[in-house]
Image: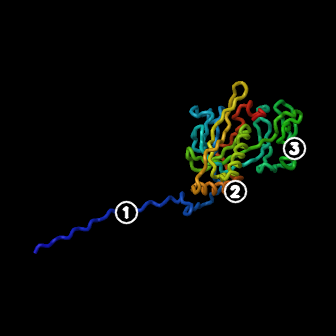
Amino acid sequence: MRTVSKKKAETLPEIRKEAPLPVVHDPKRFRRFGNVGIADMEIPALKLLQGLSPEVKANHELRAGNFYHSILEEDLGDELKVVVLLVHHSVVLRTPKNVRGVDSVVLARAADGVNWDKPNQRFEVMLPHGGKTEWNTGRNVQASGLLDWGSSDPQNRNSTPAAQHVYTVILRLLEPKIEGPVIYTGSVTANRKIMQLNSKIDIRASGGVEPLRQLYIMTAEERQGGQGISWFVPNFAPGGQLDEGDPLFDEFMAQAERLEHLYPSIKVVGGETELDDQIPSAGASNAAY
C-alpha cells in the first residue's frame, strides 16, 4: 500500500517586533539618575555674527550677518523660522568702555529689571575723556535714574545712560530644524527690534493667536554708520502660526514654563563675550539705535 507523505507545514517568517522608543526620547520612561541638575546644564547661544565677532576672525568661512549656533559651531544662514519661548528683560550697570585699556566690568545687575542686586551703592568711575564721576544705584533702578540720558556723565546732559537694558530671547529653531532651545542676547543696538517683537507678539495675541503658536522669520538687517561702518541687528517678521492641535504647541508650552522657572540658573554656551564690543562704536553710541 502506497503511503502519501504529508507536506511539511510551511514556516512563516518570524515577525520582528519594532524596537522600543529610546528612553531618552520617551518622557514617560526616561529617568535621570545621579546628581546631575540644572547647574550642570547649558543652553547654546544663537549669535548674530558681526565683522568683529571672534568666530568670524577665527574662521574666514563664517560671514557677518549670518546666525551662528555656539554648540554645533555652525553657520545657520541669514534667515531662520522660529518660535519665541520667552523674552526676559534685565538691566546691567557697567563701567565705561575704552578707558585706559581697562575692560568694562559689571558693577550691578537688576535681574528683574526693577531691583538692583547692589542697592544704595556708590561707584566712582572714570569716563572715556579722563574725568571721574560717581554713580549711585539708589534703592532701585527707577530711583537711581541710571537709565536716563545724561546719567553716565552728569556734566553732559546728552551723555548716554549709565545703565543698559538687556533683552534675552529664548527660541526654538524650526527652519533649519534644530532640537532644543537657543538663547539670543541682543546688544544695545538690537533693543528696539526686540521691543518691536514684544509688541508684535501682544498684537497677534490680542487677535486670537496664542504667543506659542506664533511663528516668526528672523533675519539680519544691516545698519550703516559713519565712515562706511556697518553692523547687523535682528528683525522679526510674522511667519504664520502653528495649526490647532499641533503637538509642538504642548511641547513648547512645557519647555517655556520650565525655562521660566529655571531662568536664573541657566548657563549659556558661547554667550560670555560682551556683544557691544563686537559692534563698531559708531552704532552703539548713536542715540538713534
Q: Is residue 175 visible?
A: yes
Mark 2 sits on what residue?
261
Looking at the image, do the residues carrying marks 3 and 1 touch, with CB atoms under 8 Å apart?
Answer: no
Residue 194: x %, y % from top left: 71, 43
Q: Residues within 10 Å of mark 1 (few under 14, many from 20)?
A: few
Instruction: Tell me how far mark 3 sits from mark 2, CA to CA.
Output: 31 Å
Q: Quadrant of residue 125?
A: top right
* 10 Å crowding of disc 3: few (<14), some (14-19), many (20+): some
State the residue at coordinates (63%, 59%). 35
Q: From the top left corner, tell me how far across and down residue 193 is, in percent.
A: 71, 40
- Say which residue label 3 marks: 136
Mark 2 and mark 1 lie on one chain; the one further toward the N terminus is 1
Q: Earlier in the sequence, mark 3 or mark 1?
A: 1
Left or right of 216 on screen, residue 274: right
Residue at coordinates 87% horizontally, 34% vertically from top-left?
A: 157
SS assignment at label 1: loop
